[in-house]
Image (cartoon, rainbow, N blue to C red):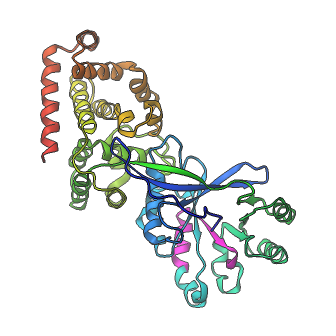
Amino acid sequence: MSTSPNAPPPPSSPAAGGTSGAMIARQAIMNGQQAVVGYELFNRSRSHGAHTAASDVILVFTALSHAGTEELVGKMLIFVNCTHESLAGGHLELVNPDKVVLEIPALGHTANHEVAARLPILAGLRARGFHLAFTHTVLESAYAPWLPLADYIKLDLSVLAPDQVAVLINYAGRHSQAELIAEKIETAQQYDMVSSLGVQLFQGYWFSRPALIEAKLLTPTQASIVQLLNLVRSQASTAEIEEVLKKDAGLAFNLMRLINSAGLGLAHEVTSFRQAVLLLGLKKLFRWAALLLTAMRSGGTPPAVGQTAVVRGRLMELLAQEFLPPEEADKAFVIGIFSMLDQMLGMPLASAVGLLHMPDGVDDALLHRQGVFGELLTLVEACETSNDSAFDHAAQSLKLSNQQINWAHLQALAWADQLAHS
């Protein structure tokens, strides 16, 4: 494990707008040109040394779901410390294996008995596309069955003497295909020594200290998550599952954030909840919801802004159904509910929308009120604020009558009220 801050900060408290947070430290791993190739993540909401299977799960989940302005995962590799107990966890099915390096701990005095028993799990992870990193102890004879699985071997300069480092580098070069990472580099002399021996990846205070990032999570209500879990467990229809997602803005945001994150590795952005459910599948959806329930604090009653977002989404959907095909009406709901992300996340709307990696047409509607969806959004905002001028202009542009709009608005209010009390 690489260098970490001496003392973690206290856990962050829930932010305004229905968010909760966790402190994650991120330390760069550099190449010889001092370009960042990846980051190692540390959970700093826990006390130092409180690294468990549960904290592994929450760390990966939080990194994927993070709602801050700065990506935690992005397009870089992420190196995640693991316990052997967490390696079989379903949370690993929620990430794109190409982006994740699992740091596998040594087994200590049990190595002679446990190496063979652990081998099938490690081989299975690598076959699925995960990269595996080991400490330099993997070069010991007891770990010989693991050595062919090593994509990276980390050399800890805080515990290895220079002559040991030279021997290990030579041995690794002859007996493995792994890339070597010299970690805990604190001086230029250490860097010069390992680079002269052929090491090409580096980590430590001499390059950068771990940077603390407050990872914000938009918090759905516990009741919504439990309802979603129950529906998935009973293999309910996609339509029933979609209804639960539509009623909770926090739940909706978290799913779209996950499905369109770089960590999941999909080729195209998803713009409807139906698409998200179908692409993720019931098994992964259940695991995601279970992790969400674990990670979130009790949400209580949905905040007013979340309720307004749900009404707005439903009203846009109903109006879109008057003149657009069903899949476009689904997109209208998504645009409506996410048009209040700035208030829900406490950040500029452009930054919040950027987290979802939506297609340009969606961004144009949300940020610039352009296109048919932009007109629809302008219309529903005029309904909320009683702006007669904007209402008349948008209604005329969309060729919608006052009767159609008023009836749809009443239906949207009734629908949201029914959901809130169901």
Residue at 83% of width from left, 63% of height from top? Answer: 198
Residue 310: x %, y % from top left: 24, 36
Along the line of sight, the residue nearer the viewer: 373 or 39? 39
Residue 127: x %, y % from top left: 55, 67
Residue 358 at least partly seen: no
122 drawn magenta: yes
- The quarter holding residue 342 reads top left
**What is the span of residues highlighted in magenta in the rendered image?**
119-138
271 relative to 295, above or below: above
63 relative to 87, above or below: above
43 relative to 217, above or below: below
Along the line of sight, the residue nearer the viewer: 227 or 41? 41
In this image, 44 relative to 164: left or right?
left
275 relative to 326, above or below: below
Q: How many marks?
A: 0
- Image quarter hosting the N terminus: bottom right
28 drawn magenta: no
Residue 300: x %, y % from top left: 23, 51
Q: Residue furthest right?
A: 196
Along the line of sight, the residue nearer the viewer: 399 or 55? 55
In this image, 128 relative to 329: left or right?
right
Residue 60 at least partly seen: yes
Residue 219: x %, y % from top left: 33, 49
| Type of secondary structure dominating the magenta stretch | helix
